[in-house]
Image (spheres, helix red, strand yellow):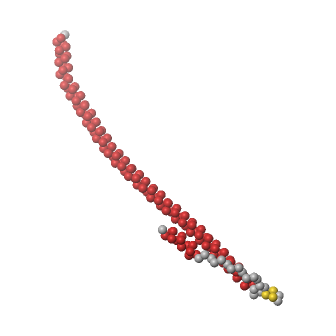
Amino acid sequence: MVASEVRNLAQRSAGAPKEIKQLIDVSIDKIGAGAALAERAAHTMHEIIAAAGKVNHVMSDNSEASREQSGGIGQVNDAVVQMDQVTQQHAALVEQAAAASLEEQTDSLPAALSIFKLGTTSATLPPAAPRPVPVPVRAVVAPQQARLAR
């Protein structure tokens, strides 16, 4: 019985190095596969970092473009406000000019009517009141043009 145990033990001992070698070979294969996976993961991480850098750069460019657009919109808004002011001043000047023209026509109406005679006497009207002197157009427009030139 001891001899059979010794024989079994000897047979198992003889096969053990083969099993150990197979286990070592399997471990080497698994280590190689793990190293290849780690290398691929490192490569992928480098690509992700590069892509993140590009995204950061694009976002920075977009932010700068937004700031520039905001400034441009502000300038356009200022220009529109100035154009509105100039338009209002021009409208006031046109209104003054129209009023002055009407006043001039009104002032000349008695003289034009005086040529007509009613019966034996000529129709005369009292002299017209002196009209106010209109404001020169250049005096009103010049300050606005100076502001636009800035």
Residue 105 is situated, as x and y percent measured from the top left of the image, at 69, 80
Residue at x 59%, y 70% (from the top left corner):
89
Q: Residue 48 sits in which quadrant?
A: top left
Quadrant of residue 125 in the image? bottom right
Residue 145's spot in the image, x, y percent?
52, 71
Task: Please provide percent x and percent y for residue 59.
Answer: 41, 51
Residue closer to the observer: 109 or 20: 109
- Relative height, residue 72 to residue 33 (above, below): below
Of the 4 image quadrants, the one containing the N terminus is top left
Q: Is residue 150 left or right of residue 21?
A: right
Q: Say above or below: 72 vs 89.
A: above
User: Residue 83 appears at what percent x and percent y?
Assistant: 55, 67
The image shows residue 36, relative to residue 135, as above or below, that is above
Image position of 77 (left or right of 12): right
Q: Which one is nearer the viewer's eye here, 115 or 34?
A: 115
Residue sitting at 28 percent across and 36 percent down?
Answer: 34
Q: Residue lying farthest bottom?
A: 120
Q: What residue do we see at 28% from left, 39% from top?
A: 36
Identity of the residue furthest to the right in this view: 119
Quadrant in the rendering for residue 122:
bottom right
Left or right side of 16 for 148:
right
